[in-house]
Image (cartoon, helix red, strand yellow):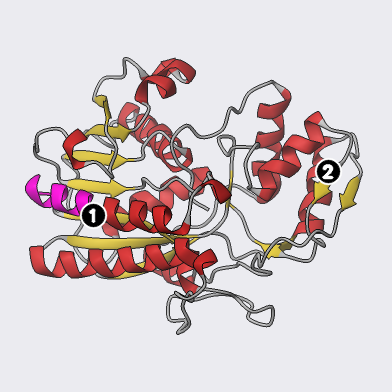
């Protein structure tokens, strides 16, 4: 294992979304305990909106929010020193609203701009939040996707523009790192649960929690056989922080849970945890090529880091239910990977 570079000043792009909120909480607790001393600068397109919803972050010592759109370099502040950069900014909540071209431009172009900025700031470590979508379609007979899986998303299928753009951004980041002596690590992120996950967009687990609390039935749009796995955002934050500080440069790591659950099983679990036994209805709709299975192999990160998931799926779902029952959860403000 490479020697970890102690963080001195950290830049987080997209730091007011689902990923960012989890990391902010982790940073704050570690700073309170004296385990982390580095200041954090968080970039967001809408920091004022975020701080209105989360005013507790407005006056935190060592934490600065800046209004920046990573796609627009003219919004970038003057380069100052950073030791670590976490590039999390990718809006995956827009669904069909984003065209394949705009999605590709945003992911690839934004990554290029942030890499250039990291270099100007003298950063030594760079974490790119990528996606399991880079592997393309996972067949039903393939239990898990490993980092060595040879298949990839199909560039001729514009529905896979998100995964293709992420794959291109990975190649760009690794090439940039080799040319500029920047230690690049890639997190291929799968599916997640947690109290900050939006319940009003296209994330099935969030929709199920919303339906259980606010509706008369939990609706499954497909036939219920699609399989996913979910890592809680608390564990997600632990894993991302290990990757940016200790992950091997030039390597990609899957980030997610390796415990599969079908959509019907997930909906039933949410219903049971809610306690009111909300009925589950299967609509059997055609979901337009939605992948039937999406489960990673995470042996690599578990072996190298020694980390283990600390929050069970039931505990994560219970947290989500409590938040929605209390009238909370307005969704991630800036970005949430899928």
Task: Residue at 45%, 41% (x, y): give it.
Answer: 335
Q: From mark 1 to mark 2, how far is it between C-alphas?
A: 40 Å
Q: Secondary structure at mark 1?
A: strand
Frontmost residue, 97 versus 189: 97
- Bounds of the magenta span? 113-123
Q: Is residue 138 magenta?
A: no
Labels 1 and 2 touching (C-beta < 8 A): no
Q: Which mark is residue 218?
A: 2
> Compared with residue 304, is residue 44 higher up or lower down, i.e. above or below?
above
Q: Position of residue 156 (x, y in %)?
A: 47, 76
Q: Is residue 210 left or right of residue 54?
A: right
Frontmost residue, 95 versus 248: 95
Q: Is residue 115 magenta?
A: yes
> Compared with residue 145, is residue 34 higher up or lower down, i.e. above or below?
above
> Compared with residue 290, is residue 328 higher up or lower down, i.e. above or below?
above
Magenta stretch, main secondary structure, is helix
Task: Residue at 43%, 36% (x, y): give it.
Answer: 334
- Earlier sequence position, callout 1 versus callout 2: 1
Q: Position of residue 153 (x, y in %)?
A: 48, 74
Task: Residue at 9%, 39% (x, y): give it.
Answer: 81
Locate residue 48: give its quadrant: top left
């Amino acid at each position: 294992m490479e020697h970890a570079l102690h963080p001195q000043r950290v830049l987080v792009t997209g730091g007011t979304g689902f990923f960012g909120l989890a990391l902010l909480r982790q940073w704050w607790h570690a700073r309170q305990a004296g385990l982390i001393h580095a200041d954090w600068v968080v970039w967001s397109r809408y920091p004022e909106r975020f701080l209105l919803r989360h005013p507790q972050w407005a006056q935190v010592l060592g934490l600065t929010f800046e209004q920046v759109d990573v796609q627009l370099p003219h919004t970038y502040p003057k380069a100052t020193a950073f030791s670590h950069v976490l590039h999390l900014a990718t809006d995956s909540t827009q669904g069909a609203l984003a065209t394949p071209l705009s999605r590709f431009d945003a992911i690839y172009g934004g990554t290029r701009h942030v890499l250039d900025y990291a270099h100007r700031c003298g950063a030594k470590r760079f974490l790119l939040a990528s996606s399991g979508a880079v592997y393309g379609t996972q067949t039903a007979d393939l239990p898990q996707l490993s980092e060595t899986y040879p298949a990839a998303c199909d560039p001729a299928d514009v529905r896979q523009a998100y995964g293709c753009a992420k794959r291109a951004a990975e190649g760009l980041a690794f090439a940039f790192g080799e040319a500029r002596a920047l230690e690049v690590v890639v997190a291929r992120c799968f599916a997640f649960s947690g109290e900050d996950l939006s319940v009003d967009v296209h994330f099935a687990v969030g929709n199920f929690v919303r339906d259980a609390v606010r509706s008369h039935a939990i609706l499954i749009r497909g036939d219920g056989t699609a399989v996913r796995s979910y890592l809680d955002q608390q564990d997600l934050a632990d894993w991302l922080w290990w990757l940016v500080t200790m992950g091997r440069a030039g390597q990609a790591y899957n980030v997610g849970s390796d415990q599969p659950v079908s959509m019907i099983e997930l909906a039933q679990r949410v219903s049971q945890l809610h306690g009111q036994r909300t009925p589950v209805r299967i609509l059997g709709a055609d979901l337009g090529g939605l992948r039937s299975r999406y489960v990673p192999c995470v042996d690599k990160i578990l072996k190298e880091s020694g980390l283990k998931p600390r929050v069970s799926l039931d505990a994560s779902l219970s947290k989500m239910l409590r938040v929605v029952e209390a009238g909370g959860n307005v969704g991630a403000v800036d970005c949430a990977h899928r």
